[in-house]
Amino acid sequence: MKPIERLRALDAEAKLLEHIGAILGWDQETYMPEGAINERADQLAFIEALSHDKATSPEIGRILDDLGSTEGNPGGPESLPTIDRAYLRVLRRTYDQATKLPSELVSEIAKATSLSQAAWVEARKHDDFQAFAPHLSRMLEFNKRIAACLAPEKRPYDVLLDQYEEGSTEAQLTEVFGALRTDLVALLERIQGRPQIDDSFLHRPCPAAAQAEASAYFMKVLSFDSRRGRLDTTEHPFTTTLGDSDVRITTRYIEDYFPSSVFSTIHESGHALYEMGIDPSPEYRRTSLAEASSMAVHESQSRLWENTVGRSLGFWLQHLPRLKQTLAPVLDGVGLEEFYRAINRVEPSLIRTEADEVTYSLHVILRFELESRLISGDLAVDDLPGAWNDGMKRLLGVVPPNDASGCLQDIHWAMGSFGYFPSYALGNLYGAQLWDAMKAQGLDPKASVELGDLGSILSWLRTNVHKPGSMYKPGELVERVTGRPLDPSHFVRYLNDKYAGIYGF
Ligand code: ZN
């Protein structure tokens, strides 16, 4: 066996274990009886330890070294085939990241994280930031230690960002988000100066069974491959990959707000289409190359389908009659234009996950600004609630009445994830830039949506974004496909055009 093939075989074993763990995790969120939680935690910890051992086996390190992959030149010699170089780069990165953290630190973090998450649940329930503050401080300390292990010469927040979005830095994001923030705040002001939209009919009671039928319909419309995936229900919708032909998505049915299930099903289907579209050839299959380029690229796919396609007038021109029929009599008497305006209503609110397309990124920018200051030490943990509320007032003009709907609303920091939030806003920016690239390359995606032809959009995304998996770093991928580095003006133009039509300015 050639060394590179041996490497793929070892990697495939680690992936098998990872996917087995994912099945346990998926089951825990969907069907597991409550009483099984303790044994399930042991099962998961056991599988995760095995999977970690596989992924960090010294043999992988030796083969990477033998093939000429080093930290400075992870792809190895230029004489190797391009696909092998990409593979070595990806594997060197995960191998180094996993082996640079001492295992005592990893298990110390795992324990502290489960305590921190439990404390966060309680603190949010009782609106008690002080009870959570010591856990947040510990999570910050751990993140600084992780950064010091991975790249002691770099700024800690840059190291953390790089874990989720390879190649991104605080300096780059400060520039991109700074421009975006100014434009979004200006757009929001224009919208608020116009008559507001009534969306009360979206809150009419609608049985879960009818919503489930609508979910099945939209999955079909998007070409979700039901032989390679399925939909279930959970409190918080998510997507998880259990194998190269098994991608699970979830949604939730809120009886007095059916759009929640419609758009979360479309959103998660967008994630699934990405996973299902990765190159199935032997060089990819069951290896680390068969993964998304990054979290933000993943989010660009889900949000492109949910918002750019799913909240467009052309999409509902095609699909509103069917939705009205499925949900009848809920939408009786509601016209196309009225429906389109209602699902795109803009209103600054307290909760990120419920935010509209205009205000969503502002929520993310606030978290980026705060977490970078928490990591650098410029912002003390005790001062977080005040800084959060000031930021909400500055960016969105609303102030949370309590910390539960303020700085305690997201689980990310409680889980020790710092540097993750920017992915959500970057996803919007990548999505808009990809959409414009389709147009520049002769496609007319808007006209395709109006005609009910989503296949041409999906096939373009498959070729350009899905198929390569993690062959390219996210920034590289976007530049290859669109011909330009990340540029927030595509997203800003998209929003301005869309909302000028809706709000009439
Ligand atoms: Zn998502």
Image (cartoon, rainbow, N blue to C red):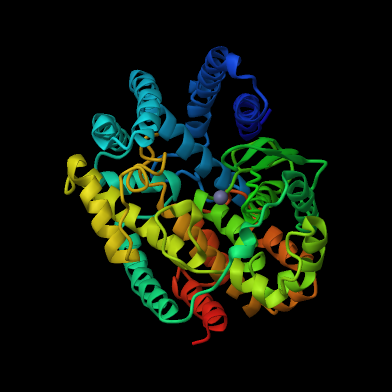
Considering depth in this image, is 488 or 393 the residue closer to the camera? 393
Residue 222: image location, x then y, percent = 75, 57
In this orientation, does residue 444 appear?
A: no
Considering depth in this image, is 430 or 306 the residue closer to the camera? 306
- Residue 282 drawn above or below residue 309: above
Q: Quadrant of residue 234?
A: top right
Residue 367: image location, x then y, percent = 34, 52
Considering depth in this image, is 139 or 46 the residue closer to the camera? 139
In this orientation, does residue 299 appear?
A: yes
- Which residue is located at x 44 percent, y 53 percent? 352
242 on left or right of 398: right
74 on left or right of 311: left
Q: Residue furthest bottom?
A: 505
134 on left or right of 58: left
Quadrant for the N terminus, please.
top right
Considering depth in this image, is 253 or 314 the residue closer to the camera? 253
Q: Quadrant of residue 245?
A: top right
27 on left or right of 345: right
Mark count = 0
- Which residue is located at x 44 percent, y 50 percent? 165
Residue 105: image location, x then y, percent = 33, 22
